[in-house]
Amino acid sequence: MTFGELFALCDKSIEGRTNLIIELRGLYPSINPKLKDELIDYLNAENEFARAKRGFYRKQMQYSSAVDLYKDAVEDVPASYYGADFYRANTARRKRKTNDASLELQRSTDNFLESYSKVLVVEDGMARAASTSGVRFVSIFKEYEKENRTAATNIPHYASATLR
């Protein structure tokens, strides 16, 4: 799956949940109001999480591109003295862009983890409301919490946010 396909899938899932929220608010008066409120909160939290995940993947892609461009700039050593000024300026510019991309990825990672924590709380409330109403509900976010947190924090920028 390409990043473009992933972003399109995120957008599609957000749109689908938003439509379901609208439908839940206007229809289905027979559903337990507490369960309906919890379901709407859960769907909103999922949307927020999908947006955070999309942003995280986008920043990860931008960081990876910035690192590749920086490496290319460093390896493109000029053949003569006349290119030295351009080389120094270009590598310095690429280094700044890589550091900026790293900091943006750091913020995006923090947003992703914060959103994940929030969806876990909302999911727990949804699970209790579903159980009380006799509806089967599987807590997916809780089940995959460790793997998702590890995936978010095991990317190169997290250990050192800037190049030296």
Image: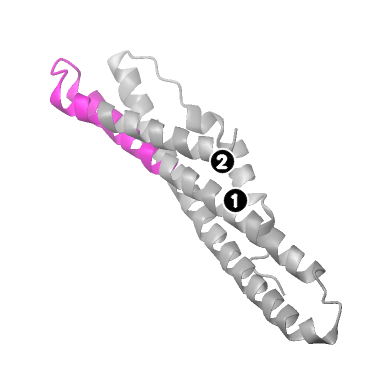
Q: Which mark is residue 61?
A: 1
* Badge 2: residue crowd in 10 Å (few <14, some 14–19, many ≥20): few
Q: Judge left or right: residue 95 versus residue 100.
A: right
**Residue at 48% of width from left, 44% of height from top?**
54
Look at the magenta stretch and give its main secondary structure. Answer: helix
Q: Looking at the image, can residue 75 be seen?
A: yes
Provide the residue span drawn in magenta: 21-49
- Residue 90: x %, y % from top left: 68, 76
The part of the image, by quadrant, that contains residue 75 is bottom right
Q: How many tags in the picture?
A: 2
- Residue 108: x %, y % from top left: 50, 55
Asked if labels 1 and 2 touch by Cβ distance under 8 angstroms, the answer is: yes
Q: Which residue is mark 2?
A: 3
Amino acid found under the numbered disc labelled 1 = Met
**Residue at 19% of width from left, 17% of height from top?**
31
- Is residue 36 or residue 77 the one in the foreground? 77
* Quadrant in which the C terminus appears: bottom right
Q: Looking at the image, can residue 159 be seen?
A: no
Q: Is residue 27 magenta?
A: yes
- Mark 2–mark 1 Cα distance, whole angstroms, equals 8 Å
